[in-house]
Image: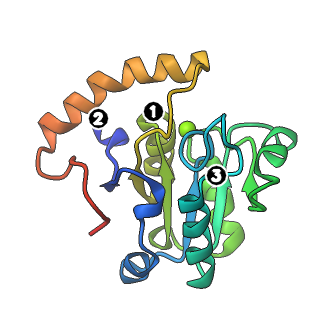
Amino acid sequence: MIELFKPTWMVETAYEIDPQALHQHGIRAVFSDLDNTLTAWNNPNGTPEMRDWMQRLQAAGIPLIIISNNTAKRVGKAVEALDLPFMARSLKPLGFGITRARKKLGLAKSEVVMVGDQLMTDIAAANSAGVRSVLVKPLIDTDKWVTKINRVVEKPVMRQLKRRFPKEVQWQEKIN
Ligand SMILES: [Mg+2]
């Protein structure tokens, strides 16, 4: 059960994910959560570092697709400034949205990685869909009640993960 929440990699922020390292792992597309992973509520355009990373992915020919539980209307508005494709109503922690987006690109499970700041939704969805994942630290604390509840539940889950997989479940400088 606890394996459902186990990320493949853990790095501080999305922009530490090097396109070159993705190539080495045979990853051809990055799927990502939006809120607190790529943008924060007080900066919907993303930081310069994040935008620079998006450009580096693009230059490397690796598409970045938002996997959101929101409606198309809401997520469309939220990603407008970033100009990124998205999959709405993804039903995270289920794998449906990831699988739908992956099939649309004609990619194998091994060719996709899912990035997100929450074990209970993003990482569980990645594992449900059978793709690798990167857990990042939330950009800032939001006041959304759903997120707050998830965080409270996440602490014991993370503790259990660290106990069960002490070597693997660790924050790293980069994906290896
Ligand atoms: Mg999030």
What kind of residue is marked 3? Gly
Q: Is residue 129 above or below residue 26?
A: above
Q: Which label was assigned to residue 61?
A: none
Relative height, residue 91 to residue 105 (above, below): above
The residue beneath circle 2 is: 2
Residue beneath disc 1:
120
Decide: few, some or many residues near mark 1? Use Cα within 10 Å; few <14, some 14-19, many ≥20.
some
Where is residue 18 shown, x and y percent of the image? 42, 72
Numbered disc in front, either 3 or 1:
3
Residue denoted by label 3: 46
Q: Indicate left or right for 59 with 129 as reference.
A: right
Q: What is the x, y in percent for residue 96?
A: 63, 48
Q: Residue at x 75, y 61 (%)?
A: 85
Judged from the image, the secondary structure of the residue bearing numbered disc 3 is loop
Viewer-proximal residue among 50 and 119 = 50
What secondary structure is marked by label 1? helix
**Picture coordinates of residue 162 (x, y %)?**
17, 38
Q: Give the quadrant of the N terminus.
A: top left
Q: Are marks 3 and 2 in contact (CB under 8 Å)?
A: no
Residue located at (58% from left, 50% from top) = 38
Q: Looking at numbered disc 2 in the image, what kind of residue is underneath it?
A: Ile
Label 3 or label 1, whichever comes before in sequence order: 3
Image position, residue 126 (x, y; %): 48, 50
Relative side of 98 to 123, left or right? right
Residue at horizontal 46 percent and vertical 37 percent from the top: 118
Q: CA distance from mark 3 to mark 2?
A: 32 Å
Marks 1 & 2, CB-CB < 8 Å contact? no
